[in-house]
Image: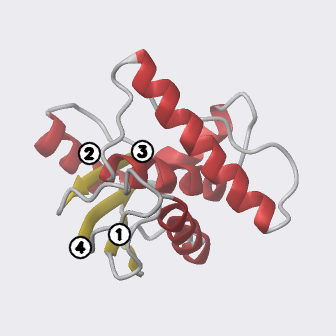
Amino acid sequence: MSIDVNNESGTDVDERAILDIARYALTRMRIHPLSELSVIVVDEDAMEQLHIQWMDLPGPTDVMSFPMDELRPPSKDDEEPPQGLLGDIVLCPEVAAKQGREAPTQHSMDEELQLLTVHGVLHLLGYDHEEPDEKAEMFGLQAAIVDGWRAERGLTGPSPAPTVS
């Protein structure tokens, strides 16, 4: 799997963890191993510009996803996953840090960025959370992926609760 992490934010983030959890999520979702993903970390000003341009909403947000080939996980275990460009995930560490501090289970900016990376991957794969049943499915899958990744690394303590809406 080709995953590029480009930190343009000027904030020190755990790029290795972002790369690792993105790879874990894509593997868990059975995405073709030759698929490509780009993760870009930007500051609040850049994120606000993207948020206005693409969503027509003011202010910076935590994560945005820009799908390319609209890849989807295979629906059957024996089905061969398609190969292609997943797209881009854009993360904002300043917003992540604030959300981590304000979450019911306070956690670090890097833990929030890991959660947001999985959230962005799921959006690229067609998951959404507009409707209650969609939200339950997406957030359940998101928690299972984050928990599985943390367990494999022997990380202790509660996983970050979803702070994205």
Q: Nearer the viewer, residue 112 or 120?
A: 120
Residue 102 point in image, percent of width and height: 64, 31
Q: Amino acid at mark 1?
A: Glu
Residue 14 point in image, percent of width and height: 60, 71
Which badge, 1 or 3, comes first in the chain's sequence?
A: 3
Q: Nearer the viewer, residue 4 or 9?
A: 4
Which badge, 2 or 3, comes first in the chain's sequence?
A: 2
- Residue at numbered disc 3: 62
Q: Distance between the Cα atoms at labels 4 and 3? A: 26 Å
Q: Amino acid at mark 3?
A: Asp
Q: Nearer the viewer, residue 81 or 20?
A: 81
Q: Residue at x 66, y 35 (%)?
A: 161
- Residue at numbered disc 4: 84
Residue 99 point in image, percent of width and height: 57, 38
Of circles 1 and 2, which is in front? 1
Q: Amino acid at mark 4?
A: Gly
